[in-house]
Amino acid sequence: MAPPALSFLRRAAALGLAALLAGCSSLPPWLGGTRAENLAPLPPIDGGAVAGILWQVQLGGRHASLLTPALAGDRIVAAHPDGTIIVVDAASGAQTLRFSAGSERGALAGGVGASDDLIVVTTVQGWTLAFDYTGKRLWEARVPTEAAAPAAIADGIVSVTAVDGSMSGLDAQTGNRKWFLQRQLPPLTLRSASIPIALRGGVFWGTPLGRLLALDIQTGAIGWEATVANPRGASELERLIDVLGRPSVDDQRICAAAYQGRVACFDLIQGTLLWNREISSLVGTVMDARHVYSVDEKGVAYALDKSTGATVWRRDVLAGRRASGLALVGDRLAIHDLTGHLHFVSTSDGRIVARALGDGFAASAPMASTGQAAVVQTRSGQLLAVSVR
């Protein structure tokens, strides 16, 4: 465990970086930002598609948290720091449930984990709270510190990552801890976090040390550990290599991205490196049948061949703006930037085919996707779905 002074400094640094990441008008160059008055005009739209808001729900007041909505079957589950949790129909936006998690355990943080029968949220005080789809609290459990990412739920286990570099495996029925893993943290980390994913009996987790881990979801045993990126440079800022966003996966491979590092793909079972590219990203990767997609810290979008990592196309979509979210919507790549614009890009050639939203729709958290719409939770407290046709 880190000494108290170091823990305090690490926490202060993380909060300081959180403020920088949350702002949209004045990001430092090392985070890929540009002052608002110096932003170049957005590239023109080169396509006949039309994007628009499919539905919109007011979740709560303004916030700058990293709370990420979750997709559970045909439902979207979202939460506000004040404790409000809502469940809406993914197609229509009709609200089927709205309740409060309460405030006695602290403000909600990190996002929502959801399965067919369980809603899991975490708090700034290190509590994990589980509810059913009537809003009844089923259990609560303590993890070492605040969680910065949604929990992953599968095979009767709730996997919760915390900002101290630990992961806890909790029994989905009782909340009892079944396993615990602690990883070393570097002196400085980004407030944004890697979102764990659970599948095929494992949970996959990216760390602030540039590693991607595959754990047995029942025991927490490490199946493999792979290097996405290694730190470079003399200063702690130069050596930031957090694995960020949600890894993307298919039957054969898993791909992840690190800030000031690389986009890398690994064999899903063995963890052996398949390929990597020197692309620094803050939003992770998404994948379809042909390509792996990412956006670098300067707003340039990439489509990479899944098998080789070769560049299929490269397009400056954001004109120096930083991306805050990435999702696949049909055969388009949706990219949300910190000014609030939502850009839709052709997955075949990188053309910008449509653009929606804008000022007032900025978000700090990653998007979700229903497959037919991008789901955005904005800093102004809105939950909305945007489709393109």
Image (cartoon, rainbow, N blue to C red):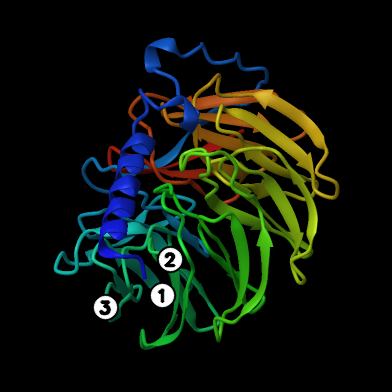
In the depicted view, which residue is nearer to us: 313 or 239? 239
In the depicted view, which residue is nearer to us: 227 or 270? 227
Specify the label residue 113 is tagged with. 2
In the depicted view, which residue is nearer to us: 315 or 384? 315
Specify the label residue 137 is tagged with. 3
Specify the label residue 118 is tagged with. 1
Name the amino acid type tagged 3.
Answer: Arg
Residue 208 visible at all: yes
Q: Badge 3, how many Cα within 10 Å: few under 14, some, many 20+? A: some
Q: Badge 2, how many Cα within 10 Å: few under 14, some, many 20+? A: many
Quadrant holding the C terminus: top right
Question: What is the x, y in percent for residue 253?
Answer: 76, 60
Residue 350 visible at all: no
Figure check: 47 above or below 3: above
Residue at the far left in the pictured view: 104
Closer to the observer: label 2 or label 1?
2
Comes first in the chain, label 2 or label 1: 2
| Mark 3 → mark 1, Cα distance in angstroms | 10 Å
Q: How many marks?
A: 3
Question: What is the x, y in percent for residue 358?
Answer: 41, 25
Specify the label residue 226 is tagged with. none
Do the numbered discs 2 and 1 sit on residues whose CB atoms are within 8 Å? yes
Residue at 64% over, 79% down:
201
